[in-house]
């Protein structure tokens, strides 16, 4: 059996077509330079590709998408190049098991299996069943070393990784597709529907949450307007190392996130939005103000950029698309604190919250900020704030154009979406 191999700069997921086809030699040059390109495997008489391989060595990434005869993706594989240049970790995979030829791609009722693997041997397998045997089943995968890792083939020597799925029992003969004319020049201007290397979660319009007059929506309320940030006291960080963590953790564990800041006392703020809605209980429209984020303001200088703070040991080479890092909480609570006095501050927090000791902590009323503790020996403080649920919350660090930290923000719920602005508030 003959399989045609084609190269291109990108793959359009929506059109299921190559974008800017190129010759094998051009693809070889991009491979050597670490630039993104795709390899498409097709078979005569079949409209859908057999598989598409997506390569970006500069992102430590190789992806594989397998298609069935109906043109539906049936398997995604995310592989990562780590410290050993000779092999790839099968980092993450998703398999969809369509129950019939008419089932839509990624249909909600489609059973699927997700596998998460890490280089230290850890892993997680999640099976999502539908119908009468519905539900999710999470287990630890038991895999051989060669099932976790794959030898890295040289350019042009990759096998058809989906051969078994397509029922091919003999290795196919590969034939490189001819390219009519040279590929158009340019990178980075592919349509939005084209594949791009995976990226961790991005911050979104955080500055706008603190800019009065900006219109946003949370998906439930069609229109909300940002009001002046509310200032709720200050936090003393004499050690110069800010902790952002869930305070409901083992005291010896240490804070989940730390951010170096100049030693000092910093303003605590709440980003707030105002919206109106019809209240069935009151039989009338009411206006409400809600908090969307909490911020420790290090400087009045506007943030030129935002980055996600990472926990110790986080390796960006392992992050899948939109993955977050942050602090975890089982009690819908986070805190800003001086990391230099983390142990004493956490002990005071526990006394104040759990034991109700009025000398250990000060209650903060009518705010997402709930409780303040102070270590008398150092003057360091901890201030706890409420989130809207349990889970992991990213910590966003704002930096000015010179790269210095100007603010640290935690969204207490999801990031609202910006609406078209009536005036210039969003651009001020």
Image (cartoon, rainbow, N blue to C red):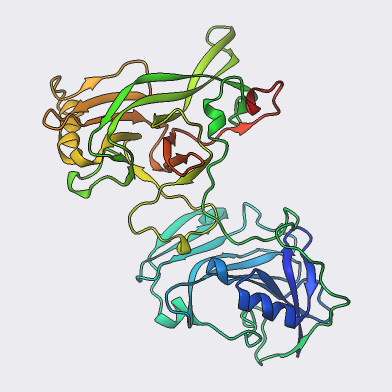
Identify which residue is drawn at 51% across, 62% down: 114
Examine the rendered structure and indicate whether residue 132 appears above or below residue 216. Answer: below
- Residue 80: x percent and y percent? 50, 70
Left or right: residue 108 compared with residue 308: right
Examine the rendered structure and indicate whether residue 282 appears above or below residue 172. Answer: above
- Residue 312: x percent and y percent? 33, 55
- Residue 229: x percent and y percent? 47, 21
Q: Quadrant of residue 336?
A: top left
Which part of the image, by quadrant, shows the N terminus? Answer: bottom right
Q: Quadrant of residue 61?
A: bottom right
Which part of the image, by quadrant, shows the C terminus? Answer: top right
Examine the rendered structure and indicate whether residue 237 appears above or below residue 25. Answer: above
Identify which residue is drawn at 18% across, 38% down: 341
Left or right: residue 333 compared with residue 419: left
Q: Quadrant of residue 199?
A: bottom right
Counting the numbered discs, the total is: 0
Identify which residue is drawn at 41% across, 30% down: 299
- Residue 292: x percent and y percent? 48, 28
Of 49 and 313, the residue lying toward us: 313
Of 117 and 151, the residue lying toward us: 151
Residue positioned most to the left: 377
Examine the rendered structure and indicate whether residue 32 appears above or below residue 293. Answer: below
């Amino acid at each position: 059996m003959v399989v045609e191999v084609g190269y291109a700069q990108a793959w359009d997921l929506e059109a299921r077509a190559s974008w800017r086809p190129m010759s094998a030699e051009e693809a070889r040059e991009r491979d050597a330079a670490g630039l993104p390109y795709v390899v498409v495997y097709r078979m005569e008489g079949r409209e859908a590709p057999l598989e598409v391989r997506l390569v970006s060595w500069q992102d430590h990434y190789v992806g594989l998408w397998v298609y069935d005869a109906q043109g539906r993706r049936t398997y995604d594989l995310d592989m990562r190049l780590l410290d050993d240049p000779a092999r790839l970790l099968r980092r993450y995979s998703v398999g969809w098991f369509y129950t019939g030829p008419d089932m839509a791609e990624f249909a909600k009722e489609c059973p699927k299996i997700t596998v998460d693997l890490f280089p230290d041997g850890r892993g997680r397998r999640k099976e999502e069943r539908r119908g009468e045997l519905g539900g999710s089943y999470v287990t630890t995968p038991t895999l051989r070393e060669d099932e976790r890792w794959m030898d890295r083939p040289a350019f042009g020597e990759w096998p058809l990784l989906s051969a078994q799925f397509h029922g091919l029992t003999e290795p196919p003969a590969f034939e490189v597709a001819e390219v009519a004319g040279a590929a158009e020049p340019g990178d980075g201007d592919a349509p939005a529907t084209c594949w791009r290397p995976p990226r961790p979660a991005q911050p979104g319009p955080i500055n706008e949450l603190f800019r009065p007059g900006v219109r946003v929506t949370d998906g439930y309320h069609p229109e909300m307007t940002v009001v002046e940030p509310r200032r709720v006291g200050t936090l003393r960080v004499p050690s110069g190392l800010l902790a952002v963590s869930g305070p409901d953790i083992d005291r010896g564990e240490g804070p989940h996130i730390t951010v170096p800041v100049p030693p000092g006392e910093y303003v605590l703020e709440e980003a707030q939005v105002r919206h109106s809605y019809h209240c069935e209980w009151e039989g009338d429209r009411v206006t409400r103000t809600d908090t969307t984020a909490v911020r420790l303001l290090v400087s009045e200088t506007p943030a030129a950029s935002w980055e996600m703070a990472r926990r110790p040991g986080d390796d960006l080479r392992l992050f899948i698309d939109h993955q977050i890092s942050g602090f975890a909480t089982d009690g819908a609570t986070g805190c800003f604190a001086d990391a230099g006095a983390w142990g004493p501050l956490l002990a005071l927090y526990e006394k104040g919250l759990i034991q109700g000791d009025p000398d250990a902590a000060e209650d903060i009323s009518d705010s997402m900020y709930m409780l303040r503790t102070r270590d008398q020996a150092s003057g360091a403080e901890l201030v706890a704030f409420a989130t809207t649920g349990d889970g992991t919350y990213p910590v966003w660090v704002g930096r000015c154009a010179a790269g210095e930290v100007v603010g640290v923000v935690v969204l207490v719920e999801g990031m609202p979406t910006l609406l078209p602005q009536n005036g210039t508030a969003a651009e001020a």
